[in-house]
Amino acid sequence: MKKFKLAVEACLACFGACEVCAANCIEMNDKNHLNCILLCRDCAEICILCVKFCSRNSGFSTALMKLCAKICTACAVECEKFAHHAHCRECAESCRKCAAACSFKW
């Protein structure tokens, strides 16, 4: 797991940021945030799955991390559309960091 340490930490942070962002967007009850909510939920799920795979040194960790980076990037792009909301801005930043960590060449 040591080689995945930075990715695991980034995934955990991203999971939390996505959960907070999705919850806040739901509370806003604005249909313009629907895609943001959906992407945050997808991103949170893939991040937790990456943590699980990397923690047990699964042979599929790097493949899953590649998908995680792609989803994190998509989520960041969507959240950046609503960067005037702190939770969306913070989520986008966390997603960008996670995408970078999961894109690291082993």
Image (cartoon, rainbow, N blue to C red):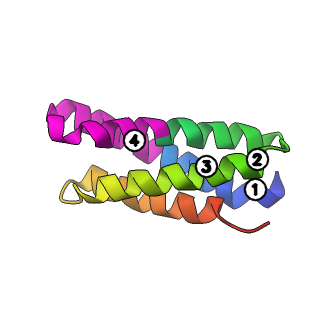
Q: Residues within 10 Å of mark 4 (few under 14, many from 20)?
A: many
Look at the numbered disc 2 and give the secondary structure of its residue.
Answer: helix
Which residue is painted at 81% across and 60% down in the image? 3
What is the secondary structure assignment of the residue under circle 3? helix
The location of residue 73, given as percent across then percent down, is 46, 57
Q: From mark 2 to mark 3, how far is it between C-alphas? A: 10 Å
Q: Nearer the viewer, mark 1 or mark 4?
A: 4
**Label 2, on which residue?**
61
Q: Main secondary structure of the magenta part?
A: helix
Asked if the residue at tag 2 contacts the one at tag 4, i.e. Cβ–Cβ closer than 8 Å, the answer is: no
Q: Which label's residue is closer to the chain start, 1 or 4? A: 1
Q: Quadrant of residue 70?
A: bottom right
User: For the residues carrying marks 3 and 1, which lies nearer the camera in this image?
Assistant: 3
At 75% from the left and 52% from the top, the residue drawn is: 62
Q: Which residue is mark 4?
A: 39
Give amino acid for label 3: Leu
Q: Is residue 33 toward the left or the right of residue 90 in the image? A: left
User: Which residue matches tag 3?
Assistant: 67
Task: Indicate the secondary structure of the residue bearing disc 4.
Answer: helix
- What is the distance, in whole Å, between disc 3 and disc 4 at their CAs? 13 Å
Q: Residues within 10 Å of mark 1 (few under 14, many from 20)?
A: many
Label 1 sits on residue? 4
